[in-house]
Amino acid sequence: MVDHKPKSIAEVPLSQEELEVLVGLPAGNAFKIMVVDDDPDIRNLLSDALTRDLPYLVESAANGIEASIRLGTFKPDLLILDIFMPEMDGLELCRVIKADPELNQIKVIIITGHPDHPKLNQLAELGYTDIFAKPFNLKKFLKTVDTRLQTS
């Protein structure tokens, strides 16, 4: 018998009432985060860390195109975004977000395995300066997430 349990709470479809019980406050009041990375291990690690003890609702996407589609229905307060992904990279997704009046207020934290790549300069020119080089300190990362969500 094969066990097909979800690897992350973010993979479990929940009703509004279940979400409220899970996060301890009305789901409409919980911060929403989208994790976008082509590495499923990174997505699961971050989703688990963000939902373990914190009142966050987390969605994930494997690339920029998938994230763009999900942004149509799930408007996150914060986007955690890898730069180098297939189909649509993080820089292009940031350009899409910046150009859309309904999305351009989303806060973005960049995660990358290439901390010296020139694309990071282009992201900084767009105003995205929170950058974490993989591997990164998870406690410091979670503190930055919380700080960004608490500031307007």
Image: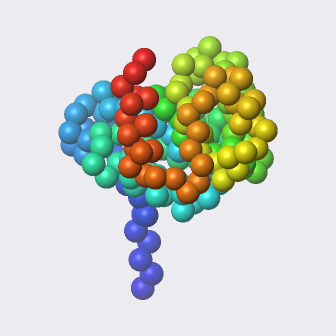
Residue at point 31% right, 52% down? Answer: 52
Quarter that holds the N terminus:
bottom left
Residue at point 54% right, 40% down? Answer: 80
Residue at point 74% right, 32% down? Answer: 121
Q: Is residue 119 visible?
A: yes
Answer above or below: position of 140 versus 126.
below
Residue at point 76% right, 44% down? Answer: 117
Q: Is residue 10 visible?
A: no
Residue 126 image point, x, y percent: 69, 23
Quarter that holds the C terminus:
top left
The quarter holding residue 72 reads top right
The quarter holding residue 118 reads top right
Answer above or below: position of 102 versus 6.
above
Q: Nearer the viewer, residue 127 or 20?
A: 127
Residue 132 image point, x, y percent: 56, 44
Q: How many circles with numbers are drawn on the protein?
A: 0
Q: Residue furthest front?
A: 116
Residue 133 image point, x, y percent: 60, 49
